[in-house]
Structure formats: C-alpha cells, structure tokens
Amino acid sequence: MIKKGDEITADISDLNSEGKGVSRLPDGFVIFSENTVPGDKALLKIKRKKSNYAEAALVKIESPSQDRVNPRCIHFGICGGCKMQNLDYGRQIRYKSDVVKDAMERIGGFKNIFIPDAVKSDNIYYYRNKMEFSFSDDEWKESVTEVKDEDNFALGLHVPKFHSKIVDLKECHLQSEITSEILNFTRAFFKERKVTAYSSFKQSGFLRFLIFRKTSATNELLVNLITYDYNEPLIKEYTKAVTHKFPQITDLINSTSAKLSRVAAGEKEYVLFGKGYVTEIIRSRTGREYKFLISPQSFFQTNTLQAEKLFDIVIETGDFRESDKALDLYCGTGAITLLLSGKAGFVKGVELSEESISDAIKNAKFNNVKNAEFICSDIKKYLENPENHEGFNKLVLDPPRSGLHPEVSEKISETKFEKIVYVSCNPHTQARDLQIICSKGNYKISRLQPVDMFPHTYHVENVVLLDCIE
C-alpha cells in the first residue's frame, strides 16, 4: 500500500479534466500527476493520499511519450497560464473531445452521442486579445534557498493553488511579444522608483494589475494600469515613458480601486492617452463585418479569430432563418445577438449586467442593426413570465462557467422552442443542465461540436443543439 512520500514508477495512460496525468495501479488505485502526458513512464512522488486516489509530483520522466513536446515558455510548469504546452497540439484536440464525451456520458447520462474532434485554433500562440497580470509583494521562488529580491516585487501570473504568489514573468506567449516587452518595461519603471506592489497579506500597496487588450482586425492596443489611487505626477511620468517607448499603444488608462479583494476591475478610470476603448471586428460567414466597442471592463470572447468560428457554428447549428424570432439569454455585450440578426428576422438579447447591456445597445447602433433588442434582467425572473418568451421559436444560451441556475434549466425543460443552441465553456455544468432540460421529454440532443478556444489549456468550449420532440 502506497503512502505519502513514496516514490513509484507509473505509466501515464490518460489525462483528467484538469489536464493532470492519470495512472492506474494493478489494483485499480489511481494516481494524478502534474506535468505528465499520456504515454509517459514517470517516476512520481506521492504528495497526498486519499482512500481511492493519490496526487503526486513528477520526479523525472523515465521514458517520454511520443506525444510529449518541448514547452516553448521558460515559465512552463510554474505559472497556470498554459498547463498543456508539453503535449502535441493534435493530442490536445483529442483530449478536449474526450472531456466533452466524458461529461455528457458520466454527468448528463447521454449515451451513444457522436462527439467530433474539437475545432482547432489557427493560432496556438499569441491568440488572446485580453491578458491580466498581477502585481504582488509575494514573488514565487522555485526553492526556499533561492534568495528573494530585496524589494520582493513581482508582476506576472498566479501560481496555481496559491492565493497571493505571483510568477515574475519575463515572457508570455499567450497574447503578443509586445505585451511581454511592455510588461517588463513597466516592472522596471516602477521598481526603479520603489513603488509598492499590492500585498494580499497587508492589504496595501499602490500597484495592483496591468491589463492588455489587443485587437486582431484593427491592431489596437489598450493598456490599463490598475492602482490603489491616482498619483498624478507618477502616472504622467509613466504615460510619457511608456507611450514613447511603445508607439504601438493606442490607448492608456489608469483605473483605481481601493477594494480589498483581488479583482482586476477599477472603480474610477482616467484616460491618459487615446480614446479609452478599442474597436474589434468580427467577420460572419455571411460576409458581413460587425464592429464592437470594447471598454476596459467589457466582456468579449478572448480568442477573436476562434470566436468567429464559434459564432459561425452557433448560427449554422441553429439553422437561423428570416422567419425566426430568436431569444439570446446571457447575451453579454451582444456579440452572438448581433451576428444572429444577420440571419434571423428578430433577436432579443437578455443579460443581468447593466454595463454589458449598455455596451450591447451601443454596438447595435454602431452596426446599424435594427432587428435586435436588448433587455437588462435576471434570467430566472425573465423566464418566469411566459409572455417574455412567447412567439420566440429559437433559443440561444451562453451562460458563465457556473452554468444555468437549476430553476432556469427546469423552466426551459417545460418550454417547446423549435431549437435550442447551448454554448458553454464548461462541459461539466453544461451536461448537468442538459440532463435537466431533457428530463421532461421535450428535447433531445441532435448535435455537439467542441471548439478549442484556448490552446495549451484544459479548457474547451462546446456547442450543443437541442431539437424539440413533437
């Protein structure tokens, strides 16, 4: 019987839904290990032991998998940005389809459903249009003997499972090379002036977050520095220095937040350079282009080019036509709603966030869309009134990772929309919700299509079509 501290050689046979390697001992006991991939033979050290499984750290790879590749990033294995960078991209795609299959069968109870391969991303590096980096006085060090900087100042990404520890990034391949350059410049600028980084323990410090938004179609770059308060002389000095060094910056904002929680959002905004927002373009398969105004705190699909594929799949899956009236719940800033307006006769978007609805209305006007309407409402309350969805024959759902409220799923299960298209970034909550929606016998799953929005991570988007059973 293995115990904590034991070292054991194991064959990695699979990955779990969190991207950890899975190995099974002859008696069925399961071991989960970080930084291992299927096909590896690895020496593992048991870190945590439970009754039917254990968690282990990788000691060394004794025989590498044919699907193992060399990670591109020097920070791989420490920061939580892209934990599957050591796995061949084709194998990542198969893994993501398997995650969807497992969720649908194990959680949803749906058997014998065809799951195609996830749609690949054309870009597997530098694909994100938004990145959030944190300042901290709690820099991650790889060993306790490593000497910390005197200032203990870090700017980068969180270490998984640690609340405050930040990897002091020197490079990141998720957004663009210019992002890394500005990040390193910003760190040096404030360290030289001995400006304090935020401390979760002390709940104090001036510098909090550095956020980038970079568009694909318009090539705009917005930098948002979030600080505790507004220090005009210091911020003006930074503005002059960073915009001179990097003329690629089109917009620079200083947001301030005195909130104790580590949330990358400001309470006040000071536009230091540019117009204070960026404009992105989404191209529909119909040939039409839609422009979106993206303010610092707006939600927008993080992989723009892959979002175009996702939205085309949604429109194709729902078979939207001029005769349709479509209801788009959890519409956010209206991206899917506006693209649907190019196919359906009328579309209504519903969302709880007032800021998102305000952006959606602006985007509709910006694109001269006349057949879309936006309503700010709690989704559960909205569905409780049958008049709100009377006359709509198609429904689109795109909830947050937590999925639908059980009462929302229950209410939808009683409806008879011709088609429901459910878009989710979490197949597990999606499968749970679909089980409830189909429980009354009004709907059946007709099609699924996973989409890889985030290469090198274990996340996968999934589009499900439900047809009404007459």
Image (tube, helix red, strand yellow):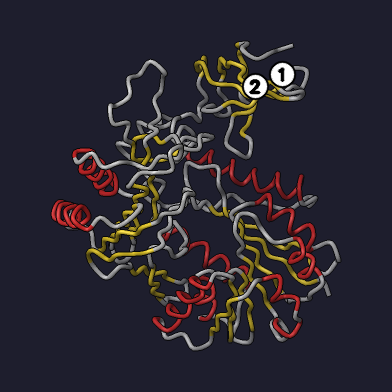
Q: Is residue 270 visible?
A: yes
Seen in the picture, residue 462 relative to 315 is either above or below; the reply is above
Which quadrant of the figure contains the N terminus?
top right
Does residue 399 appear to the left or right of 416 in the view shown? Answer: left
Give the x, y percent position of residue 403: 66, 58
At 39% from the left and 55% from the top, the residue drawn is 130
Query: Residue 25: which disc?
Result: 1
Quarter of the view holding residue 267 = bottom left
Q: Amino acid at mark 1?
A: Leu
Quarter of the view holding residue 401 = bottom right
Quarter of the view holding residue 283 = bottom left
At 28% from the left and 45% from the top, the residue drawn is 183
Q: Nearer the viewer, mark 2 or mark 1?
A: 2
Front-most of 345 and 401?
Answer: 401
Q: What is the secondary structure assignment of the residue under circle 2? A: strand
Mark 2 → mark 1, Cα distance in angstroms: 16 Å
Cβ atoms under marks 2 and 1 closer than 8 Å: no
Q: Residues within 10 Å of mark 2 (few under 14, many from 20)?
A: some
Q: Amino acid at mark 2?
A: Arg
Give the x, y percent position of residue 451: 55, 54
At 72% from the left and 75% from the top, the residue drawn is 383
